[in-house]
Each structure stands twice: as structure tokens, then as C-alpha cells.
Image (cartoon, grey):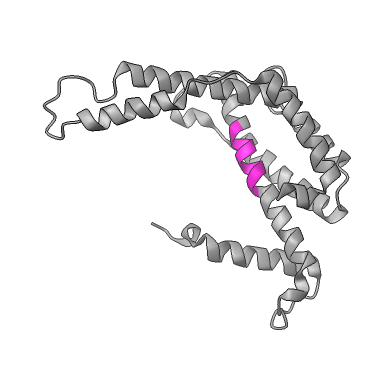
Amino acid sequence: MMESCFGGDTYDLWYAQSEKVRQACYVQPANPDIVNTAVDNVITSYKPDGSSKTPLYPRQLVDTVVKYAKYQLSNFTCQMHGLGYLKDDLSLDYQYIADELMNFTIPDDLKADLQKLGAYCRDITSCYNPNIFGKMTETEINIKRAVFYVRCDKEVRSMACMKKDIKAHLAEFDTSSMPEKDPNVLAAKLLYAFINVEGNDDLKLY
């Protein structure tokens, strides 16, 4: 999706750079099959009546899961730092991220949408306080915020690209009942409508 949205040349250049950094950073994480096997053993040995005197989640499983998570986070922060998205203290370099977007060779309207949505992710990430889960070090907070930002960035990039596609095929939609005439506004409203139809759980209170 990103390749068709950003254009082959822009996407290929970014992907090649990302892949180079990924290979330089990559550390083989603990084999997830070990985790799955350990979980299976827990399930088969579980006694609902609580008669088992051993912990439900044995040390082997806990240690393996923690080790796997550490490898994954290590790979993530290394790649983010290698791409310039994280500073040396692992805090997000919002200026670098914004500058990279400015240098992308993409349509102006798509770039404008991505800039606004990027600012949105920056603002909510800056306000995100992981300490609600317990006191954390500054480094831990920075890593949590980086993960939170990437999650937001993926979502808004997808939205911007969907809006671009809707706008490009606006003639396929009969919008005669809608008062708006600006293609940009129409595409945005159609996107919002379709997102809410598909993901209507967001509009339910429980």
C-alpha cells in the first residue's frame, strides 16, 4: 500500500535505507516456538481445581518471554536510532522526522496531510505518560513513547493513503447528496464515514 501511495522511487529509497539499518541492527530473538511449546505445556498441565503446587507460569516460560521481548525492543530501538528517528537518549527526534517527510518526493496534498497527522502523533505522544503503569526511568519512558509514536504513525499514514486513493477515484462515488464540493473535503468525509462503518466498535461504549 505504501509503495503505491508514496510512489515507487520514494518508497524504494526509504525501504532500502530501512532494510540496511535493520540488517545492521538485527539480533536473532529467542525462538518463539520455545514460547509456544512452554505455553502448551502450561495449558496441558493446568488443573482448574488449583491442586497443582507449582506455578502456572514456570520460570522457563517467564524467562523466555522476557528474553524475547528484550531482543525485540533492542532491535526496534537500534533501527529507530539508525534511521535518525531517535536521539542518543532514545527520545524521539521530531524535527528529523518532520524534515525527512519534507524531503519526500510525494504529491503536495499527501505531504500536507502527513504533516498534519504527524503533528497529531507528536502531540499525543508528548502527552503520553507511561508512569501510570508504575514509576519508570527516563529511558524506559522514551522507549514507550517511541513505540506509541510508531503505532500512531502507521495508523495515520494508512489513513492519509486511503484518503489519497478515495480522492483519486472520487468519480466512482455518487456524492450528489453531500453539500461539499471541494474534492479534498469530500475525500476526508468519505474516509471518515467508511472508517466508522468498518470499525464501529469505536462508537460503542462497552
Residue 83, by quadrant, is top right
Residue 36, by quadrant, is top left
Residue 90 shows in the view: no
Q: Main secondary structure of the magenta part?
A: helix
Is 45 on the left-hand or right-hand side of 110?
left
Give the camera-side residue of 118 and 132. Answer: 118
Is 31 on the left-hand or right-hand side of 11?
left
Residue 76 shows in the view: yes
53 versus 50 height, above or below: above
Q: Which residues are magenta?
A: 147-155
Instruction: State the residue at coordinates (52%, 59%).
Output: 199
Instruction: State the residue at coordinates (33%, 25%).
Output: 38
Residue reaching furthest to the bottom: 177
The percent coordinates of residue 90 (x first, y second) are 66, 21
Residue 39 counted in the magenta span: no
145 versus 204 height, above or below: above
Is 206 on the left-hand or right-hand side of 201?
left
Residue 95, by quadrant, is top right
The percent coordinates of residue 93 (x first, y second) are 74, 28
Residue 148 counted in the magenta span: yes
The percent coordinates of residue 66 (x first, y second) are 44, 20
109 versus 125 height, above or below: below
